[in-house]
Amino acid sequence: MNQLVLSVPTISCGHCVKAIAESVGEVPGVGSVAVDFTAKTVLVTGAADPAAVREAIAEAGYEVAGCEVAR
């Protein structure tokens, strides 16, 4: 199982957290999503394609500034 840690500096409220979590949760292969409002990060576990996760965040209206993949 992989872990993705994405930096999303535009997270600014609880609505942002909910919108990102719902959008990313629909990506095939996502096991779990944790959005950290304070750190402005999104932690995704599972076998999802990192590009698809980034696209889901963009479709929710947020910009990804960086992404780390841990295996």
Image (tube, rainbow, N blue to C red):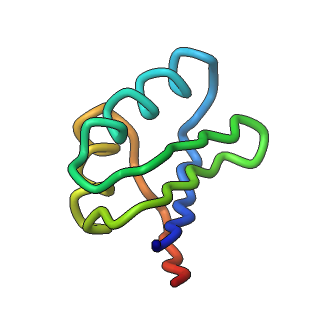
Q: Residue at x 62, y 28 (%)?
A: 12
Q: Percent from the top left, x then y, of residue 23?
A: 31, 33
Q: Residue at x 57, y 54 (%)?
A: 43
Q: Percent from the top left, x then y, of residue 2?
A: 47, 73
Q: Residue at x 26, y 44 (%)?
A: 56
Q: Is residue 11 toward the left or the right of residue 67 in the image?
A: right
Q: Is residue 71 above or below residue 24?
A: below
Of residues 36 and 46, the one nearer the viewer is 46
Dividing the picture into quadrants, the one containing residue 62 is top left
Of residues 34 and 16, the one nearer the viewer is 34
Q: Is residue 7 above or below residue 68?
A: above
View extreme (top): residue: 15
Of residues 66 and 44, the one nearer the viewer is 44
Numbered-mark total: 0
Q: Residue at x 43, y 33 (%)?
A: 20
Q: Is residue 21 above or below residue 41?
A: above
Q: Is residue 10 toward the left or the right of residue 59 in the image?
A: right
Q: Percent from the top left, x then y, of residue 13?
A: 63, 20
View extreme (bottom): residue: 71
Q: Percent from the top left, x then y, of residue 53?
A: 31, 55
Q: Is residue 48 above or below residue 22?
A: below
Q: Is residue 47 toward the left or the right of residue 68 in the image?
A: left
View extreme (right): residue: 38
Q: Is residue 22 toward the left or the right of residue 36 in the image?
A: left
